[in-house]
Image (cartoon, rainbow, N blue to C red):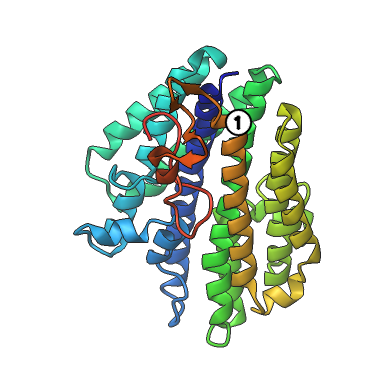
């Protein structure tokens, strides 16, 4: 597989996963705000937290946008000036898949192309809050349909491994972001937030990752912060847990081969998880710093993957992947724009 093709496959997966995760996150926040606002004087959750989770606060503040629910939701869903918006993610996933469509089942292109066109049409009309959940849940279901199609029909070759590599890495990154903003912030204010409200907020964290039912089945029916944190960070069997995602990245790299440096970084991540005292972290003893460390390691992991697989092709002195004679090109630098210095926001075709 050519390195530029591998990169486009990788970013197709990341953009598709990002659109799905963002839709789920907005829905979970919408439902939590409806449940919590009428019954609590303390509001440890707000819409601006989504800007921090998605790393788009600076872009949002740079424009003349309203910092209210409608303005933030519009920015996260359909604002094409936001590199991480759902509509922009679907557009970039579509463009990357279009350039590599011969590697995928024909239905994958048809499903994704239709999803993008229908989403663009819907975003071009009025966006009433009353229909927000139905609209975003439809996007989540369509993304899952595409992922399920590929899992059920693709040959287990390098293309499939590269696609899953991007999906697992994007998913692991989202777990750390949600826990860092929602979990760490909630713990810093737990002296003014009563236990029932804390449990409701931890439930929202689980719903943001579609983990509420599996937590109740795998761990216990009642919600407890320390057990939610352990489940989302260390569980080996839940596909959206951080550890499962990192293990998935490791398996994909092993299938592709030639990624010893990346496997070394994964070893450091797994060591950090193994040594982490979840009970201590759940008491707000360094949770933010711990998650920030994981995010930095994920950023290093992405850059190592990029240098290993994508920065390989040099034609007439021009690097397709982004590095010429050890010097990083503008294309590579622009991919590292997702603060805090972790996995990048953009890459692949038309980024």
Front residue of this view, candidates 263 and 29: 263
Q: Secondary structure at mark 1?
A: helix
Residue 281 higher or lower than 175, as above or below: below
Residue 140 higher or lower than 113, as above or below: below
Residue at point 80% right, 61% down? 274
Residue at point 49% right, 18% down? 100
| Res 231 seen here | yes
| Res 221 seen here | no
Where's residue 146, x and y in %? 54, 27
Where's residue 342, x and y in %? 53, 54
Q: Is residue 146 left or right of residue 64?
A: right
Q: Is residue 47 left or right of residue 80?
A: right
Residue at point 27% right, 49% down? 128
The residue under label 1 is 309
* Disc 1 crowd, CA 10 A, few/some/many (<14, 14-19, 20+): many
Residue at point 74% right, 62% down? 272
Where's residue 76, x and y in %? 36, 50
Residue 314 higher or lower than 130, as above or below: above
Front residue of this view, candidates 341 and 318: 318
Quarter occupied by the C terminus: top left
Q: Quadrant of residue 234?
A: bottom right
Quarter occupied by the N terminus: top right
């Amino acid at each position: 597989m050519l390195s530029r093709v591998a990169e486009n496959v990788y970013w197709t997966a990341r953009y598709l996963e990002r659109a799905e995760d963002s839709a789920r996150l907005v829905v979970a926040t919408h439902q939590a705000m409806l449940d919590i606002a009428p019954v609590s004087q303390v509001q440890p959750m707000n819409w601006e937290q989504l800007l921090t989770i998605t790393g788009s606060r600076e872009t949002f503040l740079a424009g003349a946008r309203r910092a209210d629910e409608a303005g933030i939701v519009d920015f996260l869903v359909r604002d094409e000036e936001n590199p991480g918006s759902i509509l922009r993610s679907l557009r970039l996933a579509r463009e990357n898949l279009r350039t590599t469509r011969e590697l995928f089942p024909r239905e994958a292109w048809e499903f994704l192309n239709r999803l993008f066109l229908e989403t663009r049409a819907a975003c071009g009309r009025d966006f009433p809050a009353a229909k927000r959940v139905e609209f975003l849940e439809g996007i989540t279901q369509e993304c899952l349909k595409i992922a399920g199609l590929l899992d059920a029909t693709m040959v287990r070759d390098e293309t499939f491994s590269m696609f899953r590599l991007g999906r697992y890495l994007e998913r692991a990154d989202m777990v750390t972001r949600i826990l860092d903003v929602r979990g760490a912030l909630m713990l810093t204010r737990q002296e003014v937030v009563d236990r029932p409200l804390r449990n409701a907020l931890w439930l929202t964290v689980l719903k943001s990752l579609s983990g509420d039912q599996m937590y109740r089945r795998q761990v216990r029916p009642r919600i407890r912060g320390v057990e939610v944190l352990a489940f989302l960070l260390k569980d080996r069997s839940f596909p959206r847990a951080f550890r499962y995602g990192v293990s998935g990245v490791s398996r994909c790299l092993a299938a592709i081969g030639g990624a010893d440096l990346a496997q070394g970084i994964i070893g450091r991540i797994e060591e950090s998880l193994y040594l982490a005292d979840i009970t201590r972290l759940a008491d707000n003893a360094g949770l933010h710093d711990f998650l920030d460390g994981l995010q930095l390691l994920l950023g290093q992991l992405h850059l190592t993957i990029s240098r290993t697989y994508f920065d390989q092709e040099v034609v007439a002195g021009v690097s397709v992947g982004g590095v010429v004679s050890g010097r990083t090109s503008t294309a590579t630098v622009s991919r590292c724009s997702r603060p805090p210095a972790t996995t990048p926001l953009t890459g692949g075709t038309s980024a």
